Amino acid sequence: MKSFIDLIKYPILTEKAVRLFKQNQYSFAVSKKADKTVIKAAIEALFDVKVISVNTSTQQKKKRRVGKFVGAKTQNKRAIVTLRPGDSIDILETN
């Protein structure tokens, strides 16, 4: 399979995702073919934390119209990762 960097696309920073920080949960957009065990291994390797659980969900396709052309928006897969108490990921870090 792909490297860990290719599996984890970007962190999701919606209002709900930021509220989950208090519960030690973090949201990431991941590759559609990644399963929970691979996502867990990738997060543990990239951020040096211990993952307790991984919940995933796939968005439904949504129709998109541009002029006379009808297509579909890209589908994303979201992973909500729960970390061990005491561990954290500094997603909002600015360099």
Image: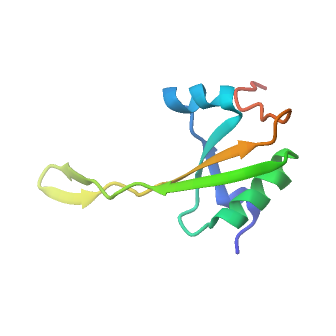
Q: Looking at the image, is 83 positioned above or below residue 9?
A: above
Measuring 70% from the left and 44% from the top, which residue is drawn there? 82
What is the x, y in percent for residue 58?
45, 57
What is the x, y in percent for residue 53?
70, 52
* Residue at the far left in the pictured view: 68
- 47 or 71: nearer the viewer: 47
* Residue at the far bottom in the pictured view: 1
Q: Looking at the image, is 88 positioned above or below residue 67?
A: above
Residue 13 found in image quarter? top right
Seen in the image, is 79 located left or right of residue 82? left
Measuring 82% from the left and 35% from the top, which residue is drawn there? 85
Colouring mode (rainbow / by chain / secondary structure / one colour)? rainbow
- 86 or 48: nearer the viewer: 86
Measuring 62% from the left and 67% from the top, which residue is drawn there? 35
What is the x, y in percent for residue 71?
24, 60
Seen in the image, is 20 located left or right of residue 40? left
Seen in the image, is 80 located left or right of residue 94? left
Q: Is residue 10 visible?
A: yes
Total numbered circles: 0
Q: Looking at the image, is 64 positioned above or below residue 1?
A: above
What is the x, y in percent for residue 59?
40, 54
Residue 95 found in image quarter? top right
Measuring 51% from the left and 30% from the top, which residue is drawn there? 16
Q: Is residue 14 visible?
A: no
Of the 4 image quadrants, the one containing the N terminus is bottom right
